Image (cartoon, grey):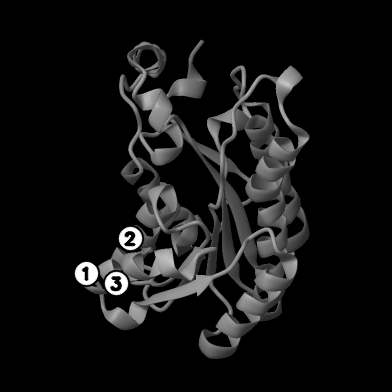
Amino acid sequence: MTPFDLTGKLALVTGSRRGIGLAIARAYLAAGARVVLNSPDAGRLAPVAAELRALAPPETVLTSAFDVTDESAVEEAVAALTAEHGCPDILVNNAGIQLRGPLTDLPLADWKRVVDVDLTSAFIVGRTVARGMVARGSGKIINICSVQNHLVRPTTAPYAAAKSGLGGLTRSMCAEWARGGLQVNGLAPGYLDTDLNASLVDDPEFTAWITSRTPAGRWGRVEDVTGPAVWLASAASDFVNGQVVYVDGGLTAVI
């Protein structure tokens, strides 16, 4: 075994039907973990699970369909998962959305929706899973933050506020749960070529700007996040706690 081996671990990854969440789920399977895929829609989750079961031992790919913003649904799903498979060893709070618009015209409903999905869900799911982790005396929680914890752009206020709050929540979780044997950290990706950023990727002017602004000189890929995600889920990071690790090609390191 190596310090990065996840054999025997159970990982719940929210929002793992596609994008960053799916990439992290694949990486955890490759590292030996059993992975619980999550999405609100069981029907849309099923083909993703089938695809992964064709690549990994079928028993290592589980599913749990629930809305991460619905407290009752979260508690019911986590209780069912724990009863059948035990409390997760790893939780990745990845579920997130982006609704853009100028602040003066932004509907309150859009603000609340982004904050609920991107921030409040991490509180709901994190608290629910952490109860079992603390009782056991061990656990890893990884909150998927953003470079917008630190840098912002016009028209992204709800997302930036939610992700900044998620960085603070990460530190608060560490402060309360570290003595219970948990390590809670954040991963802050830079600009990645994902469905969430499709309109930006397709904009030649923006792509030229972001690639010139990023020392690595390119858009990030979801695979760029998976190595750090495995590290933070593994024994290799047992004394890393309350940190937000930027995976951004150097974007936040330069003027």
Q: Which residue bears the numbered disc 1?
A: 55
Q: From this view, report whether residue 74 is shown above or below residue 107.
A: below
Residue type beneath disc 2: Arg
* Kind of residue sitting beneath label 1: Leu
- Figure quadrant of the N terminus: bottom left
Label 2, on which residue?
26
Question: Crowding at label 1, few (<14), some or many (≥20) Cα neighbours within 10 Å?
Answer: few
Percent from the top left, x then y, of residue 132? 67, 77
> Mark 3 = which residue?
50
* Nearer mark to the viewer, of 1 and 3: 3
**Comes first in the chain, label 1 or label 3:** 3
Residue at image location 68% in from the left, 32% down from the top: 158
Residue in the image at 38% along x and 72% along y:
33
Coordinates of residue 37 in the picture (x, y in percent)? 45, 67
Q: What count of labels does the image hold?
A: 3
Residue 157 quadrant:
top right
For the residues labelled 1 and 2, the Cα–Cα distance comes to 9 Å
Q: Secondary structure at mark 2?
A: helix
Label whose residue precedes the other's in the sequence (1 or 2): 2
- Which circle's residue, 3 or 2, is located before the other in the chain? 2
Spatial CA span between label 3 and label 2: 13 Å
Horizontal arrangement in the rendering, residue 215 relative to residue 142 (left or right) = left
Amino acid type of disc 3?
A: Ala
- The residue located at (34%, 64%) in the rendering is 48
